[in-house]
């Protein structure tokens, strides 16, 4: 396959040559036509001059015109011949020697007006342009004046021009070829660098390579920037994946080690009923934890693979109320208050939205001190549904707040905290799947507000 560098060079060269050839042909033809027209005009003028000179002597018979007389009009490459009314040559210029100009304008022995006054003939191997004009005296044609001019100088001018054009085209061809090749190589060097960097990445499996480019920010510069930005993104995604895998393995290893420990206990204390009951209880708890963790990991993997939620029109206030009732009953250490619950019609997945609300309330309960109150509020505002869950816990530091949506991020660890740091990651993905947004606002020492904003659907 011919390389881009060569293709560009050849295209460039081809276009240059075609334009040059077209330009040369057109200008050559225009010049040639105008030079020939110029000769035709000169011939007419010359013939008129001779006719006028002959008319000065009105009564002299046409046969009396001598060669000397015709030679008065001589100039190099110019021929003159005078014929009588029957086409017989009565005089011609010296430079014709023994030759005569062909007299082909007589029809039936009479000078015809219908014949084209111009002809082109060959004399001694040279092209000669001829023009004839009738000699009229007292309304009667008494003969004709024939003038001719050689095309020799015109042809030598045109042949010089042809040489100049051919030479010029050859020079342009050479310059265009080498210049084009050089320019294409220079212009495409960054592309070669990109190809080099790509092959390094492929061979060394190193996403840390970047293309070095110090040229202007033109199309190529832009391409290099985009390519490097793509590598940055790929590298961060790849490293994110690796981190995710390592964290997931770590999260699973701890409970699995605990499970193996408990199984060992079961085997060892065959007769100790109390220890066996304790070990089975621990096994159940850890098993549930591992199962929850695997559910979360599976959901995140599905989200990464582009899996979408099935949304249907629903009343969010029903789900909100349900979550409030169940939270009020299950969290007897905290006081859960319902501040507002306006009717809110949305397009959503009720199970997933319930999961989000429960997760946020679970966090509020986990992170705030016993007996602290937690407020729930659902309002509709400007075609948006806003759900707020506020607590009076320790709050989140500004450094941590930037990372709380990262998978496996856990800040301060309260007692009995068993979360893997995936709750908010999943909650935000679910809310975004609904076309909404999940935000966390927090003040250290004052508390945290989790805010869900969803687009409101016009009520049926
Ligand atoms: P997990 O599933 O382990 O609870 P999350 O993703 O829900 O993890 O939360 C991540 C981190 O965000 C928590 O470890 C905690 O540090 C912080 N956080 C979340 N909610 C609150 C809250 N209401 N108050 C204080 N810190 C919070």
Image: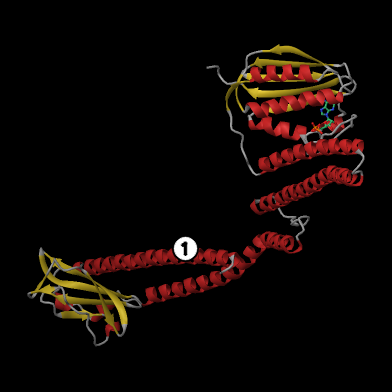
* Residue projecting furthest to the front: 271
Determine which quarter of the picture holds residue 180.
bottom right
Q: Is residue 448 left or right of residue 99?
A: right
Which one is in front, 304 or 349?
349
Q: Is residue 165 left or right of residue 452?
A: left
Which one is in front, 455 or 123?
455
Which one is in front, 195 or 286?
286
Q: Is residue 281 above or below residue 201?
A: above
Q: Is residue 70 left or right of residue 374?
A: left
* Residue projecting furthest to the bottom: 98
View quadrant of ligand 1? top right
Q: Visible in this render: residue 57? A: no
Q: Is residue 419 above or below residue 147?
A: above
Residue 405 horizontal/vertical position (percent): 77, 34
Residue 73 horizontal/vertical position (percent): 30, 74
Determine which quarter of the picture holds residue 55.
bottom left
Q: Residue at x 72, y 34 (%)?
A: 426
Residue 266 horizontal/vertical position (percent): 88, 43
Q: Is residue 74 left or right of residue 248?
A: left
Residue 40 horizontal/vertical position (percent): 29, 67
Tell me the quadrant of the picture where the N terminus can be found: bottom right
Residue beneath disc 1: 19
Q: Visible in this render: residue 197? A: yes
**Element under disc 1:** helix
């Amino acid at each position: 396959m011919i390389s881009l560098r060569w293709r560009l060079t050849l295209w460039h060269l081809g276009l240059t040559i075609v334009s040059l050839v077209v330009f040369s042909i057109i200008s050559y033809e225009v010049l040639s036509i105008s030079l020939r027209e110029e000769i035709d005009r000169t011939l007419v003028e010359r013939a008129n001059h001779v006719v006028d000179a002959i008319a000065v002597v009105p009564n002299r018979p046409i046969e009396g015109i001598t060669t000397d007389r015709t030679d008065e009009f001589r100039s190099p490459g110019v021929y003159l011949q005078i014929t009588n009314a029957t086409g017989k040559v009565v005089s011609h210029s010296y430079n014709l020697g023994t030759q005569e100009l062909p007299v082909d304008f007589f029809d039936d022995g009479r000078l015809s007006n219908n014949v084209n006054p111009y002809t082109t003939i060959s004399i001694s191997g040279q092209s000669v342009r001829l023009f004839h004009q009738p000699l009229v005296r007292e309304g009667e044609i008494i003969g004709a004046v024939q003038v001719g001019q050689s095309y020799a100088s015109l042809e030598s001018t045109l042949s010089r021009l042809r040489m100049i054009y051919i030479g010029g085209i050859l020079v342009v061809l050479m310059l265009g070829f080498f210049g084009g090749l050089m320019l294409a190589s220079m212009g495409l060097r960054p592309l070669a660098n990109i190809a080099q960097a790509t092959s390094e990445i492929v061979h060394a499996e190193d996403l840390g390579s970047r293309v070095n480019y110090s040229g202007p920010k033109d199309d190529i510069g832009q391409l290099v920037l985009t390519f490097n930005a793509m590598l940055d993104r790929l590298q961060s995604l790849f490293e994110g994946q690796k981190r995710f895998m390592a964290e997931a393995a770590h999260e699973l290893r701890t409970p699995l080690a605990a499970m193996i420990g408990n199984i060992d206990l079961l085997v060892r204390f065959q007769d100790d009923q109390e220890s066996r009951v304790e070990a089975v209880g621990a096994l159940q708890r850890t098993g549930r934890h591992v199962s929850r963790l695997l559910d979360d990991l599976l959901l995140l993997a599905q989200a990464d693979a582009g899996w979408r939620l099935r949304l249907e029109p629903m009343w969010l206030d029903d789900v909100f109320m349900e979550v409030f009732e169940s939270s009020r009953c299950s969290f007897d250490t905290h006081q859960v208050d319902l501040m507002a619950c306006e009717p809110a019609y949305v397009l959503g997945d009720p199970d997933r939205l319930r999961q989000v609300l429960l997760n946020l309330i679970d966090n509020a309960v986990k992170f705030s001190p016993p007996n602290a109150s937690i407020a729930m509020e659902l309002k509709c505002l400007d075609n948006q549904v806003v759900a707020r869950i506020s607590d009076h816990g320790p709050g989140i530091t500004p450094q941590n707040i930037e990372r709380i949506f990262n998978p496996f991020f856990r800040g301060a660890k309260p007692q009995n905290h068993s979360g893997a740091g995936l709750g908010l990651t999943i909650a935000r993905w679910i809310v975004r799947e609904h076309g909404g947004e999940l935000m966390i606002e927090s003040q250290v020492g004052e508390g945290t507000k989790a805010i869900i904003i969803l687009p409101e659907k016009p009520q049926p």
